[in-house]
Amino acid sequence: MKISEHHAGTVTLGVMIDDNDAVIFENSHIRVAVLPKIGAKIHQFLDKRTAKDLLFHHPRVEVRPPVFGANVDNWWTGGIDDAFPTGQPAKVNGEDIPFLGEVWSMPWKVESLSPNSVKFSRMGVITPFLMEKVLTLDPDDNYLTVDYCVTNIGTTSFPYIWGIHPAFPISTDTRIHIPAGNSWYVDGTGPFGTSEEFQKGEKSEKWPIKSLAELSSKDPLSWEYYYLSDLDDGWLAITDHVADTGFALTFDRKTFPNIHIWMVNGGWRGIRTIAIEPWTAMPAGLDHAMTAGTARELQVHESVTTQVKMIAFTPTTHINGFTEKGELL
């Protein structure tokens, strides 16, 4: 059923984007579009100062409602997705949990809470959980606030890993800023300028890795996957000084102590994008995380809550973090 169009405060319900229902959050700084029937994904994050959408959009895959259990690689269009209770496909307790989990491919319920806030909610199909997220855009803010709550609504506890999957374009001047201590190479065509042990996944190296932190669409074709750990603070950022754009995501590093980086610079399916993802654990598959002892367990009726902020900012050379109001420190 189509949501009736309604505008109040910074929120407009019932907008259509490419024949898909959308909820729009908009003020003088940013415009954010959410697609409730496609995993409540953030489809657009427009920085009005530069008139640029800061997110990646697949050049060949149109936005359309996915099929539950499908391979996310064949449906993914970019933007920001939620991943729960796994990243990579996983077999747990005899069940096949889909690639990127159970929420990205399903329609979510929409509830208007205030002129500036909307709650989106979705129950699991295989795993008995309720995920709720309240998105808020106040009139004067350059950031979107997302308050998450995941509750076990089943009869037994269940294991999980949880991530947020934002994807960005790679330009001629893409810079990655993350206050991490160590990095592990997982897969791909191989990082340049690193040790043989690191390239085999046998040891970590100190972050930043220059070939990953400083990217250009003119670099040799490649794709790579990394884990980062030992965060000094809970934030990540990506900048482009040529385009004069910056996007940051702040989070609780106790909830998300790891960063996963999926970098595709033309070396996979002819696209250029980088996903920089806060995660509760590494590795990226729930079954492997259970084996490694890094998966978390949610008890019956237990809830886990956390808040993230998504910020549009003017880039600087050095980034030391962000204030509660989305300003550079």
Image: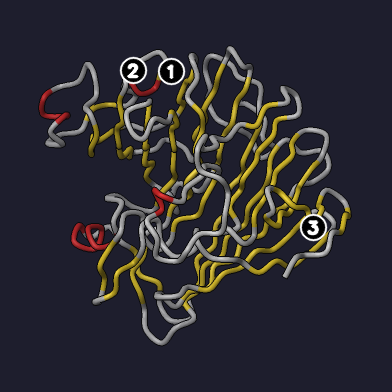
Whether the residues at callouts 3 and 2 have beta carbons within 8 Å, the answer is no
Element class at badge 2: helix
> In the rendered image of this protein, does residue 18 appear above or below residue 244?
below
Report crowding for label 2: few under 14, some 14 to 19, many 20 or more residues within 10 A (C-alpha): some
The residue that appears at 36% across and 35% down in the rendered structure is 269
Drawn side of residue 33 relative to residue 56, left or right = right
Question: Circle 1 is placed at which residue position?
Answer: 217
**Location of the C terminus (image quadrant):** top right
**Location of the N terminus (image quadrant):** bottom right
> In the image, which disc is placed on residue 157?
none
The residue that appears at 16% across and 29% down in the rendered structure is 199
Separation of disc 2 and disc 1 at Cα?
A: 15 Å
Question: Circle 2 is placed at which residue position?
Answer: 210
**Which of these two is toward me, 156 or 212?**
212
Q: Position of residue 254 (x, y in %)?
A: 43, 51
Comes first in the chain, label 3 or label 2: 3
Question: Circle 3 is placed at which residue position?
Answer: 13
Amino acid type at image mark 2: Lys
Element class at badge 3: strand
> In the rendered image of this protein, does residue 149 appear above or below residue 225?
below
> In the rendered image of this protein, does residue 246 appear above or below residue 326?
above
Amino acid type at image mark 3: Leu
